[in-house]
Image: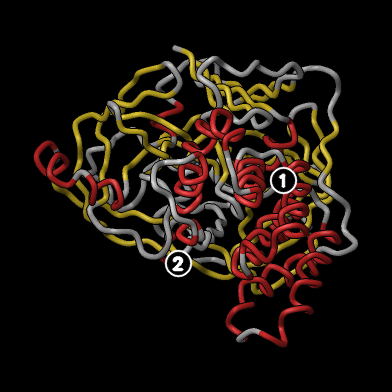
């Protein structure tokens, strides 16, 4: 339940000749492997020793984008392209402009996002093959559809917002014999045009709200774009984009909310039907959210939690909406999608490929019906009795961890997903979107 655009950077570091691991080489390797967590860790200690100015600006731009520093990200990309477009090359100029325009789009700066991409296309279209601009033009069409719309705006009193939380066990047809017996989802009350609705609370759903076509019609969503390509865990499909003038969440009013609207899908709906999701935009605009499953409440605090001594452990892949966590399995650092719309947790085919012998030795082979928006099907996996993970300074384990044995189709980032099995492990989970960290409490 997420839209994600991942564009890998062209490897440029090989144009230099390094006799040893210089500061430039370390940074370049992080960029070429899209290892933004490692880049964030090493950059403060190596930046003063870097010898290549464009590489330094390149790294700072991507760090700002990945760690949700939107204003700095827009400014640093401007500086990168104005000063160094010749050094970084046309492909990287395009990628960075797409990343920048996506930041502006998330801020509701639709005109700026449109103008930047439209100007770029106008300059280079006569000189490049048509396929070079296919993705760029798709983004441009989306921004064009929202020209004239107001920015998303969160209005709240100077006090905490506390809303009730329901956690329901989910039964997916076809998984009656699944070893995972406690798949769950979180639900919260949301008011739309005077109607009180039950929405899934989903950190993995980018944007404002995600609605079935039936709900969008009933709630009066203003349609702005047809034939919107939406990418989900089950593949790609088409939907619509619209605007909800305002929604109420506790004592907060979120205005000019972007809505993704999906048509019925018999294959997916027959397993489990989703009508309404509250996405991550309201969490981002509030700055922090605290989930307390035992107390059955969610808090959007006025006073934010300080950054823990373990530092930032959450990021966004440039050009996408999804959030990823830095966790450890033993000495191995893993990057996991943080998706409370995932009813449990899992490791993907990338993890399996790197740990095949261990997984096959310790796991039990099985199959289950799996999927989501875009499609569903029977997939093979290995069930591990437990999987130990550390986040921050907290060690914990997830029982019955599924490891998908098939490599994912298309581009996929990270080693799997932490969903509701992660949330249900702790008394409290704090998610801070300003300083980009997740902290958990026993």
At horizontal 62% and vertical 38% (from top left) the residue drawn is 67
**Measured from the top left, where is residue 80 in percent x and y?**
71, 54
Secondary structure beneath dot 1 equals helix
Task: Give me the residue at 63% from left, 27% from top.
Answer: 432
x%, y% of residue 70? 73, 43
Question: Which of the 4 quarters of the picture holds residue 299?
Answer: top right
Q: Which colour scheme is used?
A: secondary structure
Quarter-wise, where is residue 20 in the image? top left
> Mark 2 to mark 1: distance in Å?
41 Å
Residue 276 visible in the displayed image: no
Residue under pointer 1: 73
User: Is 318 above or below relative to 308?
Assistant: below
> Does the rendering let one see residue 141?
yes
Quick one: 394 or 160, which is closer to the camera? Answer: 394
Residue that mark 2 sits on? 266
Q: Dividing the image into 4 quarters, which one contains the C terminus?
A: top left
Label 2 CA crowd tier, 10 Å (few <14, some 14–19, many 20+):
few
Instruction: For label 1, count other residues whose C-alpha is less than 10 Å away and answer few (under 14), some (14-19) or many (20+).
Output: many
Q: What element carries label 2?
A: helix
Left or right for 329, reference 393: left
Relative depth, front residue between 277 and 6? 6
Is 364 displayed left or right of 293 in the figure? left
Locate residue 340, reporting x and y percent: 50, 38
């Amino acid at each position: 339940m997420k839209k994600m655009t991942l564009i890998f950077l062209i490897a440029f570091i090989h144009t230099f000749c390094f006799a040893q691991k210089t500061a430039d080489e370390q940074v370049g390797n992080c960029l070429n492997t899209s290892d933004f967590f490692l880049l964030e860790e090493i950059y403060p200690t190596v930046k003063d020793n870097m010898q290549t100015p464009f590489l330094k600006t390149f790294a700072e731009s991507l760090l700002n984008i990945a760690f949700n520093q939107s204003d700095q990200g827009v400014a640093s990309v401007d500086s990168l392209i104005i000063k160094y477009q010749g050094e970084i090359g046309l492909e990287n100029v395009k990628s960075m402009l797409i990343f920048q325009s996506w930041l502006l789009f998330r801020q509701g700066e639709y005109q700026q996002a449109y103008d930047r991409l439209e100007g770029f296309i106008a300059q280079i279209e006569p000189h490049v093959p048509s396929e070079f601009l296919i993705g760029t033009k798709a983004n441009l069409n989306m921004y064009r559809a929202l020209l004239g719309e107001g920015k998303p705006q969160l209005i709240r009193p100077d006090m905490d917002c506390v809303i009730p939380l329901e956690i329901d066990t989910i039964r997916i047809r076809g998984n009656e014999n699944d070893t995972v017996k406690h798949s769950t989802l979180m639900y919260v009350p949301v008011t739309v045009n005077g109607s009180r609705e039950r929405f899934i609370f989903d950190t993995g759903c980018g944007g404002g709200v995600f609605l079935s076509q039936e709900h969008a019609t009933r709630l009066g969503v203003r349609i702005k774009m047809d034939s919107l390509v939406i990418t989900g865990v089950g593949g790609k499909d088409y939907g619509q984009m619209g605007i909800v003038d305002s929604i109420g969440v506790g004592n907060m009013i979120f205005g000019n909310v972007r809505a993704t609207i999906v048509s019925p899908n018999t294959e997916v709906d027959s397993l489990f039907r989703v009508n309404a999701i509250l996405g991550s935009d309201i969490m981002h605009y509030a700055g922090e959210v605290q989930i307390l499953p035992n107390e059955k409440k969610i808090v959007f605090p006025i006073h934010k939690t300080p950054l823990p001594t373990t530092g930032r452990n959450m990021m966004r892949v440039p050009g996408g909406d999804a959030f990823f966590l830095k966790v450890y399995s033993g000495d191995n650092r893993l990057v996991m999608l943080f998706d409370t719309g995932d009813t449990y947790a899992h490791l993907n085919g990338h993890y399996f490929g790197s740990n095949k012998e261990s997984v096959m030795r310790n796991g039990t082979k099985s199959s289950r019906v799996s999927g989501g928006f875009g499609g569903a099907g029977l997939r093979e996996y290995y069930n591990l009795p437990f999987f130990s993970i550390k986040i921050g300074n907290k060690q914990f384990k997830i029982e019955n961890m599924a490891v998908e044995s098939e490599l994912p189709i298309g581009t996929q980032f990270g080693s799997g997903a932490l969903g509701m099995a992660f949330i249900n492990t702790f008394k409290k989970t704090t998610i801070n979107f300003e300083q980009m960290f997740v902290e958990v409490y026993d």
